[in-house]
Image: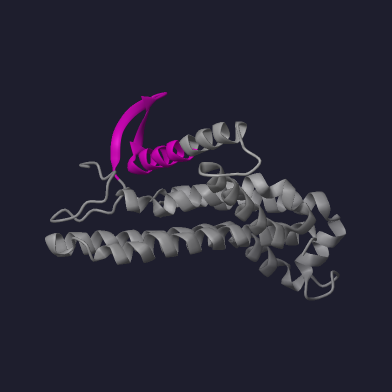
Amino acid sequence: MEHGILLSGADNIDFMIHGVFKYSFFGHEVWITTTHVCVLIVMLLIIGFAIAANRQMAKAREVPEGFQNVVELIVEKLDAMVDAPMGKAAPKFYNYIGTIFIFILVSNISGLLGLRPPTADYGVTLPLGVLTFLLIHYNQFKYQKPKEIWEGMCSPLPPWLPIWLPINLISEIAVPISLSLRLFANVLSGTVMMALIYGLLGVIATAWPAALHVYFDLFSGAIQTYVFCMLTMTYIANARGDA
């Protein structure tokens, strides 16, 4: 609590990232921060659910019930979400999109547990954007010929007149930045708002802020997760030439 792993309220308004402890690594001072701790907690929650789901599906019944229903529903909904934008290539991306969707969603709603959402740290969202960026261009170079890539970079003018090339290059480089900043800014704004409400109102903020949690953590968190994944799939489909 004193290190800011949990969002502080009352007279101690705190939504910043803090160092929990430090250690020496090859002569360099390295800090383990609240973000690292919260990411670890989120990962443990996801891994715990995955282990429970795996054990349940190992003894799955033909007519599902109970926890098996929940697991199958999650898988079906995630697969259906990938099917629409990815088309015939969807099965190749079920695992990746499903993984980042679950990680981002659980991270976004971890504020309900009193944690500082990991996605409120740009050091978490930027690597997610970079992963998507690398996947986009891997598929682009794999499924498009160099001539097609060049024509796309020169569009809307003919390929022999590359006036738009610098602008298109900037737009390509901006993809991971825009993806990561959109997710980071929306989650951070909700985190700051809730920390300020609890900090400034103190004991008055006892029950009614639950409605704000529904918006900032659940609704906004789910929307930002969906937007990030949908943009990722759209970019990849375009790079493959499937869209």
Residue placed at 81% from the left, 62% from the top?
150
Q: Quadrant of residue 3?
A: top left
Quadrant the N terminus occupies: top left
Quadrant the C terminus occupies: bottom right
Residue placed at 70% from the left, 62% from the top?
84
Q: Quadrant of residue 240?
A: bottom right
Give the answer, above or below, for where 201 lies relative to 23: below
Q: Quadrant of residue 213?
A: bottom left
Residue 38 position in % (x across, y down)? 37, 42
Left or right, residue 195 beside residue 222: left
Residue 228 position in % (x across, y down)? 56, 59
Q: Does residue 137 appear anywhere in the picture?
A: yes
Left or right, residue 24 beside residue 12: right
- Residue found farthest to the top: 26
Residue 37 is a magenta residue: yes
Residue 148 is a magenta residue: no
Q: Nearer the viewer, residue 141 or 226?
A: 226
Q: Does residue 185 appear anywhere in the picture?
A: no
Residue 37 position in % (x across, y down)? 36, 38
Give the answer, above or below, for where 194 lies relative to 118: below
Q: Nearer the viewer, residue 141 or 78?
A: 78
Label tally: 0
Residues drawn in magenta: 18-46
Residue placed at 52% from the left, 33% from the top?
51
